Amino acid sequence: MENVGVKDNYMLIQRIKSIGCFIVCILLAAICLVPLWVMVCNATHDRFHLSTNPINFLPGGDFAVNYYNISKGEMAQFPDFNVWTGYLNSLIIAGCSTVLTVFFSAMTAYGLTVYNFKVRDTAYTIILAVMMIPVQVTSTGFVQFMVGTLGLANSYIPLILPAIAAPAVVFYMRQYMKSSFPLDIVEAARIDGCGEFRTFLSIAIPMCKPAIAVQSIFAFVQNWNNYYTQNMIILSDTDRYTMPIMIQNVLGQDKHPDAGAQYAAVALSVIPIVIIYLALSKFIVGGVALGGVKE
Amino acid sequence: MASTAQSRIKSISYAKYGYMFIAPFFIVYAFFQIWPLINTFILSFYGNGDAASEFVALENYQTLLFGGDGRRERALNDTFFQSFINTVILWVGNFVPQIFLSLLLAIWFTDSKLHIPGQGAFKVIMYLPNIITAVSVAALFMRFISNNETSAANQILANMGNEAIKFENDPAWSRGIVMFIQTWMWFGNTMIMMMSGILGINPSLFEAANIDGASSGQVLRKITLPLLKPMVVYTLITSMIGGLQMFDIPFLYHTAQGDIKDHLRTVAVFIYEQFRVGNNVHSPQYGIAGAASIMLFIVTAILGIFVFRMNRDQDEARKKKERKELVKEYKRQQKLAKMGGID
């Protein structure tokens, strides 16, 4: 009988502990969500309401007014802000970069895994070594070369083409291929008369789909969010402004800002990426630890 | 038939395809990364603004590190050192709470004795801030709390009849806010890294500890933390490299255009300012920016060497060692045989 009592006691302690942990988790989750929820609610109130109630936990009905003010108001507060141009430009850059990153990284990883050639190990070592070079270090030379020497200011080329070389993605793809891409398949394909490039396209790529899916999501988010490089290259052409640059301009309106319109602009920039994230959260959360490189 | 084909294929060299597959990566990398890096190095020895074509040797480095006679040189020297100190302060201030929170949560989420409902949802929610554009995050928090009289915090103060506070001008407030935003954005990411580290520990160790009657505290101190050490060190160093690059939030946390605060200027912001802020767009200070970049590169490279060693296939390193030992063993045997066997 005594034993049962001890067990009950133990269970009770674990129970209490679990509840304590649960409460802390709820608090942290609330800290993560409340700013975003307030943002959405504030975006639906006009500036007069916001000046008396600056924090709202319930949505209002003035989103149309705010949207009108950011996009095409008579005295447009933010002439550089056009949410659809922003979406389109960001989509072009992020979409093209993602396709290039994933395809060429898979190709490089395939070359490093399947073939045995003299400089293979050296090449892989170089890729590992350059993985840690931050973009900030090369930015001076980059901007001088691209804008100064080649005259590519406002061009998308310096924003999209570099995506071909993504060392971290190559590293990840190679790890994946080493563990789940049997080399016998390549040999079998050769015997059947399949060309090398076709083997890669129609056998290796379909077999690496899980890795490609995860890396695509990350590459897309990273490029969509990249403000540093975009702001370095896109200097003056407002038609080519991407979403982060537009938001930065909205932020810079310090003289009598329309708070409702600003909230609306920020909310519009955040919502698509949040929807994508929630839809694909399973892959994203699973893939974070595998990517392994922090910004 | 098949065997002849097989042997024929084995005799063909496929090396050239290997080069073809990796060529695009290296060509693009050389053009967009290696050359800019070398270019940065070259630029750091040349003048600034209108004097960009003038070779000045180490003058830029001297200005940044030791100042000089002119007022401009002294100001640059002060700003550079201040930016380095700011970077360290901001990094420590966001890393400590971040690692504490993420370790705590990772340990709770992986503890089989605790039953926390909705773990999956918590993970998704806590990682959410990391996915949002940093510029939007900065804009959002600027609306909540900033110098602006219409920011939520100042509105609330005004409604209560208080004066507006210049949050950006106060080092403690503004640094605290930036640290909070950074922690808010990154703790979910670190937590998931830590969880994968804990899940990588052999579960039979936990089982054995449970059978032996170890308490949660003992398991934590004697098993989880010691075995998690490599993961924590890895996170520490990658986060340090990330911290050295800290840019978006400190760069954007100011209301008036181009009014970057002295106590928020990190090294990355300092470099960026030299060619992208105010008048510097038209007369870029490439020399100063280059010299600062190269110094940042050296610090990053030293840290990067540690990560590089951890990333290298540990399997392959071990195999190499084993191979070496086999060769040694073989040589020893040969020697013994020569000497006439075992004595």
Image (cartoon, coloured by chain):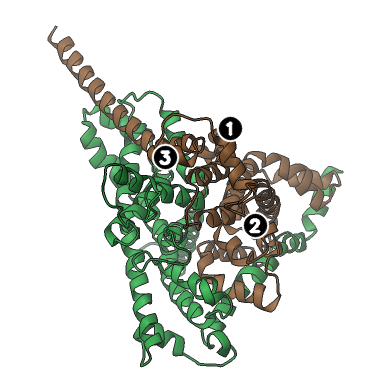
Chain colours: A brown, B green
| Structural crowding at the residue carrying mark 3, measured as other residues with C-alpha within 10 Å and reported as few (<14), some (14–19) or many (≥20) | some
Q: Quadrant of residue B90?
A: bottom left
Q: Secondary structure at mark 1?
A: helix
- What kind of element bears circle 2? loop
Instruction: Residue type at mark 1: give it.
Output: Ala
Mark 1–mark 3 Cα distance, whole angstroms, equals 21 Å
Q: Which mark is residue A35?
A: 3
The answer to which of marks 1 and 3 sits earlier in the sequence is 3
Q: In 3D space, how far apart are the residues under numbered discs 1 and 2 (Cα atoms)?
A: 27 Å
Q: Is residue A269 left or right of residue B61?
A: right
Q: Disc 2 marks which residue?
A: A241
* Residue A144 percent coordinates (x, y): 61, 76
Please, which chain is the residue tagged with disc 1 on? Answer: A
Total numbered circles: 3
A17 in relation to A216, above or below? above
Q: Label 3 is found on which chain of the structure?
A: A
Residue B173, position as x, y percentages in the image: 29, 56
Q: Is residue A195 left or right of residue A205?
A: right
Q: Nearer the viewer, residue B103 or B14?
A: B103
Horizontal placement of B58 versus A97: left or right? Answer: left
**Dot 1 surroundings within 10 Å: few (below 14), some, or many (20 or more)?**
few
| Same chain assignment for discs 3 and 2 | yes
Q: Secondary structure at mark 3?
A: helix
The earlier-in-sequence mark between 1 and 2 is 2
Report the quarter where the C terminus of chain B lies. Answer: bottom left
Marked residue nearer the N-terminal end (3 or 2): 3
Q: Which residue is mark 1?
A: A279
Q: Which mark is residue B54?
A: none
> The residue under label 2 is which amino acid type?
Tyr
Q: Nearer the viewer, mark 1 or mark 2?
A: 2
At a point 56% along the width and 35% down the height, the residue shown is: A63
